[in-house]
Amino acid sequence: MAHPRTPDDLDELDRRVYDLAVQSIPLAEIAVRMGVPVPQADERIQRVCNRLGVADRAALRAGAGTAVSQPNVAAGPVIGLDFAIPDIDPEPPKHSRRAVLAGGAAALALFGGAAAVALTRRGGSPASPAATETPSREPSPTPPADDFGGLPIQVEGGLNQRFETRAWVKDAPIDWDHGLFRMFPNTGDVQGFRFIELEPPRSGQSGFVLYKIGPGGRFVWAMHGDGRAYLLDVLNTERSWSWPIEDLRLVTAGTASHGVWVVFEELESRQGTGRHHVFSAAPGQNLELQSSFELPPTGLGMPPLWSPDGSHLAIWSGGDTSDPQLHLIQASTGRIVQSSHVIPPRDGKAAWPMNLQQLDRGFGGFLAVWGYPANTPTASPPREGQLLLWSGAWTAQGSGRVMPLEWTSRFSPDGQYHLFEVPLRHVYLESGEGVREFWTAVSVSGLEASAPGWSMLSTSIGYGDGQPANPWLADSSGFVAMVRGPEPPDRPWDAYEYAIISTDGRTITRIPLPPVADLEWFRANSMRSPAPCPYDPDLIAFGRLELYNRRTGEWLTANITSQAGPDHLDPWAAGAGQIVFALPHGGHGGASPPILLTPKRVEGAADPEFRFVVARTGDGLNLRTGPSTGSDVIGVLPDGTLVELAEDVKMPVGQRGAIRNEEGTWLYVRTQSGEHGWVSAAYLDWA
């Protein structure tokens, strides 16, 4: 193809590079405006030089003749993630499906190695930062049958061919060993969908199926051991779609007021390339390609986040070959409304994107979280985050400062409070396996505060089996935490229950434990994994199978017969009006639960001295030579006796100060008179 010979012949992407290159500004500033490293900016400029048939940037400037207007890029850094408004058209380009396909790879080129630009045509209007408008699009021509823009997607059979569905009334045994299930809070009834294997797995293939569901509950997809994934639209049951999981990733599939979107990303060696394709899905119709956009590579890919109205998508890029960047995409057009500058490495260690947390109930935005590798194998990776508003276009007026975060950091839905778990004392076993000594507290700070306003000793929000839920209630009036409970007669080591702690920490309301499930894994109270409903403050899911209604006190339970338990799926992933779970279990997560005493509220940060007082014994607490009732008694401590945590050097590292066994939790303490010994933690409170 012939190269363009004048700047007016350049495509939109190269024209933007040209407009920067002919200005009297340093190369470093050009790189900042592009959002890329200096060498990549120089490479892009040289590419434009080659296309115009000139030797270098000096020749470009000499041939420009007159000054070229600067693109509308936000001048100077913006706080936090340093979001810049790219030079974009206020009215997104009107792409028909045919025009998108005709654009090819050239239309999907990157603005820079680490910065993204929209898929646009040349000849737009002056730039505008508006991110929330949804201009009208030209209607797309009717696509050829089963044409997916060259992507390796194929049409499969629908219900009773590739998927089947079944319903169970409240409390009826669910005898499927795999599937995606929805339980309805108003009735307790359950509906299931599962993939149908048309033939036994071939040699070297697994029959394992992993299920997911999209926002709104309309799309269910199954990843099968045969190397393909299968998507079912429950409003379009005459067909389903499949694709090879080595070549495509289903980024998201959901419904909202602004449309029904299915987003795929192309893969290479199972790593995200950044090349995304957005399909619409009208009821009864095939998937139709609506738009495409390209970001820097995404690597393994992080789950994206939809704006409340479903018009925009926030999505991370960044992986092994590129630093993290956050992008705002208009779904209907593929227009990249904004991209952040890259998050730079720290101390020679590259950052990586971690997650996006929705905060729609009063705040109208979300939390973007990224992290860095830990300094030691047992340390928690350093994390940072920033609050962003959907309506603020990610400018200084719509974003907050960068904040250091803990691995458990969660913000209240109104964005006013930061909740996080604090590891007070953490000692691993020398072997690295088994029950550890782990003490926790939680702290709460205001949005603008630099230190916690208050803390609660002996509470935990890092509970559960890989549970991703936000512990805050939907109305931001409090959060759910794990606290110490009574010792079950047959499991004294499992003395855990859950409570709602008010925003100020002055009210603790215990939640009754769920009915004992006939599943070995979920008999442990510490694995109940509460997940408050993000839409209704009175609904709390437990263990992904049980639902508690605070208004009525009623429990609903999905009566599965699989002993493996459900998979790691957010019970509220499909939205309001249903909790979802999937079988089979993909492998247990989490670790041994923390050492908990009766909760105690303290002002400010949690920094206890590990001093305790004997309580509730009546006739005194036995001080023993070892952590068991079979050990010798060496003294009796009356109620009110003060003790402090010590270490028994005869025990293995990680079990010298505290240990849990079949008789409960034991602490090694020192009295004020100098006596040492083991006591039951059930009769100690924080001093």
Image (cartoon, rainbow, N blue to C red):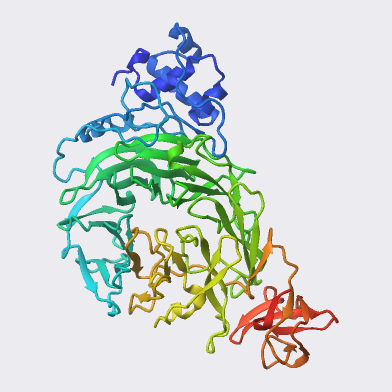
Q: Residue at x 63, y 75 (%)?
A: 598
Q: Quadrant of the C terminus?
A: bottom right
> Would residue 199 be found to the left or right of residue 372 on screen?
left
Q: Who is closer to the viewer here, 322 or 593?
A: 593
Give how far across and how far down residue 581 sits, in percent.
35, 67
The quadrant in which residue 636 appears is bottom right
Q: Residue at x 32, y 55 (%)?
A: 214
Residue at the farthest top position: 65
Residue at the farthest right position: 673
> Would residue 546 be found to the left or right of residue 510 on screen?
left
Give how far across and how far down residue 157 sits, in percent.
16, 58
Q: Is residue 438 above or below residue 252?
A: below
Q: Residue at x 45, y 23 (%)?
A: 72
The quadrant in which residue 650 appears is bottom right
Q: Who is closer to the viewer here, 16 or 549?
A: 549
The quadrant in which residue 426 appears is bottom right
Q: Is residue 183 above or below residue 295?
A: below
> Would residue 13 be found to the left or right of residue 161 on screen?
right
Residue 592 seen in the current view: no
Q: Is residue 413 above or below residue 83?
A: below
Q: Is residue 377 above or below residue 507?
A: above
Q: Who is closer to the viewer here, 93 or 454?
A: 454
Residue 501 seen in the current view: yes
Q: Who is closer to the viewer here, 127 or 431?
A: 127
Give how far across and how far down residue 144 sits, in percent.
14, 40
How many numbered discs, if any?
A: 0
Give how far across and how far down residue 528 sits, in percent.
47, 73
Q: Quadrant of the N terminus?
A: top left
